[in-house]
Image (tube, rainbow, N blue to C red):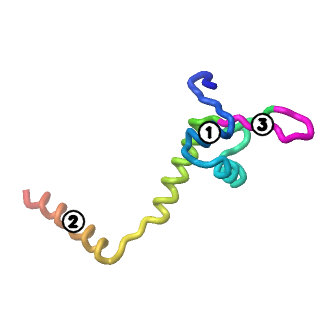
Amino acid sequence: MTSHNQTWLEIRELADALFCSVKSVYIYRDKNLFKAGTHYYSVGEGKQRGKHIYNLDLCRKALLERTAKCSRLNETYDDKEIKKLITRKADKNLSYRGK
């Protein structure tokens, strides 16, 4: 369902749209990556657990932000790569001064 340029989906549709499993969606929700009242809302009452309806765009944004944060934290270089980066930076600075 789309309303006001936002797409709201049930869990199976969300998992398909995010290319992940339904179990992954539960994990994201349990780890508070998908937050109640922001990324999803619940419908239904009674003894059975209510159904959750998810905002596709906000869930995708949360995953993108998590991915970016994790990739920055895990970015490492070996000594050879560090020397190449330093040399490249130094050569670039020297070539500007020579002009």
Asked where in the image residue 12 lies, by quadrant, the reply is top right
Residue located beneath label 1 in the image: 14
Q: Position of residue 8 (x, y in %)?
A: 64, 31
Relative to 90, 57 lies left or right: right
Label 1: which secondary element: helix
Residue located beneath label 2 in the image: 88
Q: How many marks can you see?
A: 3
Label 2: which secondary element: helix
Q: Position of residue 25 (x, y in %)?
A: 66, 48
Distance in Å between CA atoms under marks 2 and 3? 55 Å
**Which of disc 1 and disc 2 is earlier in sequence?**
1
Distance in Å between CA atoms under marks 2 and 1? 44 Å
Label 3: which secondary element: strand
Q: Residue flagged by tag 3: what amino acid is it?
A: Lys
Residue located beneath label 3 in the image: 51
Eyeballing the image, is 29 above or below 54? below
Query: Magenta span covers which residues?
Result: 44-54
> Where, quadrant-wise, is the C terminus in this rendering?
bottom left
